[in-house]
Image (cartoon, coloured by chain):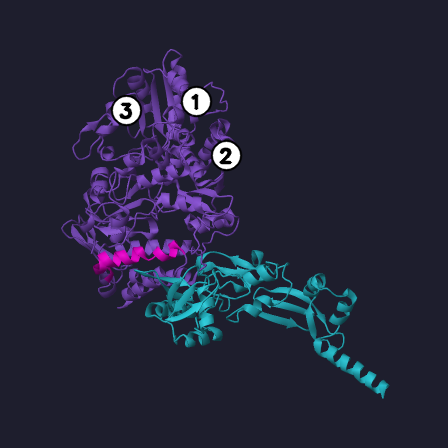
């Protein structure tokens, strides 16, 4: 692609020469079409759009300076597929195949906007032609995702030209191990995988630990329902992870790294594989990296579909070829991890932050965020929010800003009820705490946690008991079954929650859940079990009235739990069309022409067919 | 040597000894199920929880594998530690309500009943402590059984849940099972031993005198490779059961005595 021959770079000067060479070939007036091929846009057919743009480029002839680029996740998945035209940052949303020719003709060749593909603010009706005018992007700050949407993730040249691999020569050129660790310490970087452990402290412990070889691991086993932060980084900018690992390995004194990716992310595996090969070719991985004495290489391991393998000791067991089950961490993995050797494991996002910290300094990074949570955090914002997608925000931003400003508020004019953060082991935060700041300690105080960055927004129609039940069921299925409290305790919790949502609970069941929650937190072997009760504890804490309604009144206030609400026909709204009557499988609805219909509650089996079929929304849940 | 203070009682232990070792030295009982001195500690049953003093807070830790590296203070009989252990025991009782061994241990801990219903399946009261799996792997070296399935579906089984070809019928798994789930069954007429519930079978060497089972054939062959004695002599010894061998020796001695007279 570059014609540079991809020769081995023998020193930082070679790398810099390559970068200059790449930049000098760029024609400033050249246009480029960036097609988002992140998971959301790809699902909506963006790879086909990319092909069509490529075809258009090749047909345009040699005298037209234009290129098409498939880029990583741009974030606003709700409005995908997203296409950007550069220069100018022109943002087109919900692009379909027939639009390709129009964009190419009008914008690329003609320099005019295609009005109907521009983003329109649903609140104001205003159109936005560039990225920075879209409210979704306004309060975001991108460090880990900085190059996402800009570079072609399959091209190391693109990463280098954009300023990638500038942190590596900096550390090789005279930064000592301790100096690197101090820089990361100054940055105040904490683990983005969920625990929030200070990264520098982990690195230092591993560096000082006795034993050799030492390993560094990148945890890409992202398993939380609804989460795709790490995936977006691995697929959108794999070299940032590799560069971060190189710097960490150099500081720690490791020459072997592993990236553990879940098998359900085949594209992540492919992108990383390709990136590793490219880096090896240029001498950025392997022996004598950039002509120095530093040697480091990375292997990829694919997970086997177990959620618990995101836990560090289970991940290491899996890497060793044993069943992915956690073990006690009384002796830390930095001392005795993979194969019993000192091992430093960090999450994808943590690694991706490292090059920026080295390049721009720890102080710069620490200037963003709150007192104890520095930098930014990537969240996958999903659920009943208008703009679902991938967002990166500075720490300390409020939940309200994320949900209302970035997320555009709740869908269909409904009311906000709760936001679930931290993945299955996180908690639900209610409206009264929407002004809480997003930082590791604040979220923990509220009974939730930062976790790896899942953020599920729920509206008034969501039953919080059912939400708790959903997460407990998920965790119960994903529990490895090794330790008693997690295996048996979660089964018991699910049993109680099943009874509550079925209207068969007894007074005292909530207290029983509390007893089990305390037991799990205190006695489970790993973090999965210790935090598993969080969804239950937090929903009891904030939504106790919903539990009581299920138990005492046999009523589901959100009208989600079947059997705990009735269907009734609103006589005012009923047009007596007879559709409900015809569709009712139990003949439980009676009525005549021009007379509002009535549901016989004795006969009704609560199947909900009438509610679905009524064209006048006259069937109500009460 | 670091000092461990357990419920106010001070004991010195070697560095990296466990809290359980210290408690034993101090004569303080901590209930255990998945712990066995012959194998490594997996700490999976969570029954041996104690409270560790962390200065401004106390942490529940498993005593069977917590390594003592400096002076520490632990509480075995604190309210929280007892509540944790009893809670775990109640969960186990719900899983394996028929196990007499478990009931006895529970009673010793002051647990007479469980508040929980039986919601998980178990293979004849198996509590999944894993001692059988560990002893078969770490001590016998056969690894004929291991865990299969995940979460509530976890079981101990031979590969593909079929009778194992690697099982040598030694019965070590049955010997370490704390709840009497694993049994050694002798099928006299077929001259076979079966390890239940895995249905793994092995041929038996039987006493040439009385027909009583002596040892399984694969065990005798393994031992033959390991003992330092005349192979023929060893084979000869295995011909008889211990009782018949005693009788034979007595008879030989008797004959010698008669001759001497």
Is A603 left or right of A348, judged from the image as shown? left
* Viewer-nearest residue: A141 or A406: A141
Q: Can you give x and y, in whole percent of width and height, for residue A60 in the image?
A: 38, 14
Number of other residues with Cα within 10 Å of mark 3, as a class: few under 14, some 14 to 19, many 20 or more: some
Chain B shade: cyan
Upstream in sequence: badge 1 or badge 3: 1
- In three-dimensional space, the C-alpha distance between marks 3 and 2, rounded to whole angstroms, equals 40 Å
Q: Are marks 2 and 1 on the same chain?
A: yes
Q: Is residue A606 in sight in this rendering?
A: no
Q: Report the disc number at residue A27.
A: none
Q: Are marks 1 and 3 on the same chain?
A: yes
State which quadrant residue A521 falls in.
bottom left
Q: Main secondary structure of the magenta part?
A: helix
The range drawn in magenta is: A526-547
Upstream in sequence: badge 2 or badge 1: 1
State which quadrant residue A606 falls in.
bottom left
* Quarter of the figure that contains the N terminus of chain A: top left
Q: Residue A520, relative to residue A182: is it above or below? A: below
The residue that disc 2 covers is A295
User: What secondary structure is marked by label 2?
Assistant: loop
The residue that disc 1 covers is A13
Is A189 left or right of B66, judged from the image as shown? left
The residue that disc 3 covers is A89
Chain A shade: purple
């Amino acid at each position: 692609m570059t014609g540079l021959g991809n020769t081995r770079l023998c020193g930082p000067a070679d790398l810099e020469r390559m970068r200059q060479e790449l930049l000098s070939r760029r024609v400033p007036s050249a246009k480029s079409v960036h097609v988002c091929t992140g998971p959301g846009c790809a699902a909506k057919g963006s790879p086909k759009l990319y092909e069509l743009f490529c075809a258009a480029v090749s047909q345009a002839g040699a005298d037209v300076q234009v290129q098409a680029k498939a880029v990583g996740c741009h974030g606003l998945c709700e409005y995908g597929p997203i296409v950007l035209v550069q220069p100018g940052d022109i943002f087109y949303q919900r692009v379909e195949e027939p639009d390709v020719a129009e964009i190419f003709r009008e914008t690329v060749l003609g320099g005019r906007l295609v009005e109907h593909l521009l983003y329109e603010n649903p609140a104001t009706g205003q159109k936005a032609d560039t990225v920075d005018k879209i409210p979704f992007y306004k309060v975001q700050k991108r460090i880990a995702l900085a190059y996402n949407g800009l570079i072609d993730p399959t091209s190391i040249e693109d990463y280098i030209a954009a300023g990638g691999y500038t942190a590596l020569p900096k550390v090789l050129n005279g930064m000592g191990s301790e100096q690197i660790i101090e820089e990361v310490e100054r940055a105040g970087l904490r683990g983005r995988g969920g625990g929030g452990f200070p990264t520098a402290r982990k690195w230092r412990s591993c560096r000082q630990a006795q034993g050799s070889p030492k390993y560094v691991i990148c945890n890409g086993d992202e398993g939380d329902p609804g989460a795709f932060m790490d995936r977006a980084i691995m697929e959108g900018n794999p070299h940032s992870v590799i560069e971060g690992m190189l710097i960490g390995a150099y500081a720690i004194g490791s020459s072997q790294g592993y990236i553990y990716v879940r098998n359900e992310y085949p594209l992540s595996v492919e992108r990383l594989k390709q990136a590793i090969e490219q880096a090896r070719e240029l001498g950025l991985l392997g022996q004598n990296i950039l002509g120095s004495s530093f040697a480091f290489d990375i292997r990829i391991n694919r997970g086997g579909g177990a959620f618990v393998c995101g836990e560090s000791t289970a991940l290491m067991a899996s890497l060793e070829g044993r069943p992915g089950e956690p073990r006690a961490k009384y002796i830390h993995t930095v001392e005795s991890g993979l194969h019993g050797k000192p091992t430093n494991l960090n999450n994808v996002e943590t690694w991706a932050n490292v090059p920026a910290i080295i390049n721009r300094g720890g102080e710069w990074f620490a200037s963003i965020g709150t007192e104890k949570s520095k930098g930014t955090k990537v969240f996958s914002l999903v659920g009943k929010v208008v703009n679902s997608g991938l967002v990166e925000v500075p720490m300390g931003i409020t939940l309200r800003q994320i949900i209302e400003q970035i997320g555009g508020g709740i869908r269909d004019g409904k009311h906000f009820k709760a936001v679930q953060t931290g993945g299955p082991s996180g908690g639900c935060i209610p409206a009264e705490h929407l002004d809480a700041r997003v930082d590791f300690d604040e979220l923990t105080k509220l009974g939730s946690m930062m976790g790896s960055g899942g953020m599920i927004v729920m509206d008034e129609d969501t039953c919080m008991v059912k939400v708790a039940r959903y997460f407990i069921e998920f965790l119960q299925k994903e529990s490895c079954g090794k330790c008693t409290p997690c295996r048996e305790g979660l089964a018991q919790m699910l049993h109680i929650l099943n009874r509550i949502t079925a209207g068969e609970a007894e007074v005292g069941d909530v207290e029983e859940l509390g007893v089990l929650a305390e037991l799990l937190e205190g006695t489970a072997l790993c973090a999965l079990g210790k935090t598993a009760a969080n969804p239950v504890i937090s929903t009891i804490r904030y939504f106790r009235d919903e539990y009581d309604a299920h138990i005492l009144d046999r009523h589901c206030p959100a009208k989600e739990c079947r059997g705990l609400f009735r269907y009734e026909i609103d006589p005012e709204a009923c047009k007596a069309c007879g559709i409900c009557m015809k569709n009712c499988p139990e003949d439980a609805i009676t009525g005549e022409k021009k007379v509002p219909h009535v549901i016989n509650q004795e006969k009704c089996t609560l199947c909900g067919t009438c509610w679905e079929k009524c064209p006048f929304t006259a069937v109500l849940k009460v | 040597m670091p000092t461990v203070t357990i419920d106010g009682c001070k004991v010195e232990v070697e560095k990296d000894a466990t809290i359980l070792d210290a408690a034993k030295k101090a004569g303080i009982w901590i209930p255990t199920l998945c712990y066995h001195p012959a194998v490594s500690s997996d700490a999976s049953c969570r029954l041996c929880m104690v409270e560790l003093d962390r200065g401004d807070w106390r942490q529940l830790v498993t005593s069977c594998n917590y390594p003592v590296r400096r002076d520490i203070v632990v509480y075995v009989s604190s309210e929280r530690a007892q509540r944790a252990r009893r809670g775990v025991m109640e969960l186990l009782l719900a899983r394996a309500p028929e196990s007499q061994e478990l009931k006895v241990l529970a009673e010793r801990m002051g647990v007479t009943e469980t508040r929980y219903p039986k919601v998980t399946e178990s293979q004849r009261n198996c509590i999944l402590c894993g001692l059988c799996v560990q002893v078969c792997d770490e001590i016998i070296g056969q690894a004929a059984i291991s865990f299969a399935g995940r979460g509530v579906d976890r079981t101990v089984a031979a590969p593909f849940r079929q009778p194992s070809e690697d099982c040598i019928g030694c019965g070590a798994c049955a010997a370490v099972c704390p709840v009497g789930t694993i049994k050694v069954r002798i099928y006299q007429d077929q001259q076979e031993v079966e390890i239940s519930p895995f249905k793994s079978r092995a041929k038996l060497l039987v006493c040439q005198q009385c027909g009583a089972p002596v040892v399984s054939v694969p065990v005798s062959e393994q031992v033959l490779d390991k003992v330092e004695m005349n192979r023929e002599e060893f084979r000869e010894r295995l011909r008889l059961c211990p009782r018949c061998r005693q009788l034979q020796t007595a008879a030989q001695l008797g004959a010698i005595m008669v001759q001497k007279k």
